[in-house]
Image (cartoon, grey):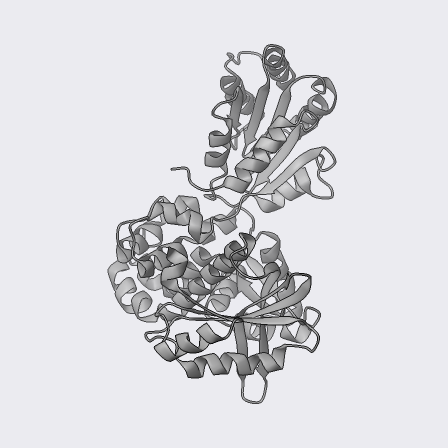
Amino acid sequence: MFAGRAKEMAALNSFYERAKERVACVYGRAGIGKTTLLKEFSKDKKTIYFTAYATTDEAELEIFADSIGVEWLTYTLEGLLEEVSKIAGQEPVLLVIDHYPNFIKADPKYDEMLFEYVTSKWVRLPIKVILCGDSYLAMEKKVYGKKGRWKDVLSLTMEVKPMNFFDARAFFPDASDEDALMFYGMTGGIPYALSHLSKDIEGSMMKLFLRDEDDATLLPEKTLSTELRELSYYNRMLATLATGATRVNAISAAVGKPKDIVVPYMNTLISIGVVRKENPITEKTNRKKTQYKIVNSFDKFWYRYVAPNMAMYYRREYSRLVREKILPGLSDFKHQVFVDMCREFLLKESGSGKFPFSVDEIGNWWENDEERHTTDSFDLVALGANEGKRVIVFSRCYYTDTPVGISTLKELIELTKHAKNKGEGDVYYLVFSNCGFHENTQTVAATIKNIMLISLAEICR
């Protein structure tokens, strides 16, 4: 199923239509939908779609020859590239090489020869080349990074990211609002996971996470293994992050390693898009407030609920794991997914002019009380503008069993006094709730222009 991806398709079409642009790089984690995107993009074009395989040099050329439509026999890579030249002499050609790191591993000279053809022999031919791969580290090293051979000739470098909620909803159009939240959270907007959902939540958990190890090719640990050799400490750190321990001291204590060892590990996870480092949006240089968080909720689900219960997993006690370890502890996970959805809603609505402000940057803010070991925070803080004036937007996302009352609204406004600096411009308050709002809360918000109440139902509409 192909859905969404409007921005990605627009970027690829722009690359294809501009005569001087010849090479594009497309990368992203396994299962993110790169192949589906590229095949949708190329279906009305003369395309040679070559998926490289981890094999020997001659076997690789045989696959390439088959993709071109010629019999391999004694072809060299140079001979195959000449065949591409002949086709381009008749009509424009789009050459897509998927799993490009496999192509290079088969013979490092392949990368050099392809580069020579693209930059010299094909300059006057209507040939567009797209290099695609799953591995962040390999693609950066060999293609788009500082030391990559292709970095200076790339016209487009695109990371294919998970779908947002609004695009992902196409995979579960009939789900209730609460189920839609969970479907989105469990899959993290990853198309492969979205395409494997069942009709109900528990069935989807089983299908996505609780299956035989041999059939778990796209689970987080398998994905990490394509990038990293030693997974033990990475797995332990991610499990620690998934439980809410986001500061270096807590992570260090959990894994039994000093901070100067933990930080490089975290930086590696950041480099492959698994973890992000955060600071309060108004205190970006305050290292004392640095936090680390898992980027995708699909990974978070695995490391929060399955990884700590591997004994049950290996015994294949899947139903018991769901019943005893997952379902009773979903409230915090649901809240974090709700925050992600609220962030996406804020960006979408402000971008389409439905809010009285634009958003330039979005993050969050928190204040730690070291003595009480507590944290006061907003879920979202956005910086933007309204008619030339600076704007700051404070938001909390309430995932509760009851509607939001007036006292909660007062707490939100009071907390902003600690975070807002004088002279920052207009202030707006956005309150999100999965259960709606009490009547008195709605009455107050209706009389104050800078307070907006948004329900889960409104987001899902």
* Left or right relative to 435: residue 153: right
Q: Residue furthest front?
A: 447
Q: Residue 79 lies in what quarter of the image? A: top right
Q: Is residue 375 above or below residue 332?
A: below
Residue 451 vertical position relative to residue 79 in the rendered view, above or below:
below
Which percent across, then down, holds residue 408?
44, 80
x and y percent of residue 358 in the render? Answer: 60, 58
**Residue 435 or residue 336, whichever sits in front:** 435
How many numbered discs? 0
- Residue at 58%, 19% in the rendered image: 93
Residue located at (73% from left, 25% from top): 119
Report x, y in % for residue 242: 47, 66
Q: Is residue 235 left or right of residue 385?
A: left
Asked if residue 83 can be seen in this view, the reply is: yes
Q: Quadrant of the C terminus?
A: bottom left
Can residue 316 be seen here?
no
**Residue 27: percent from the left, percent from the top?**
57, 41
Where does the N terminus fall, quadrant-wise?
top left
Relative to 415, say whether 84 is above or below: above
Nearest to the observer: residue 315 or residue 92: 92
Snapshot quadrant of residue 404: bottom left
Residue in the image at 64% along x and 65% along y: 263
> Toward the viewer: 281 or 60?
281
Find residue 110 and report its image quarter: top right
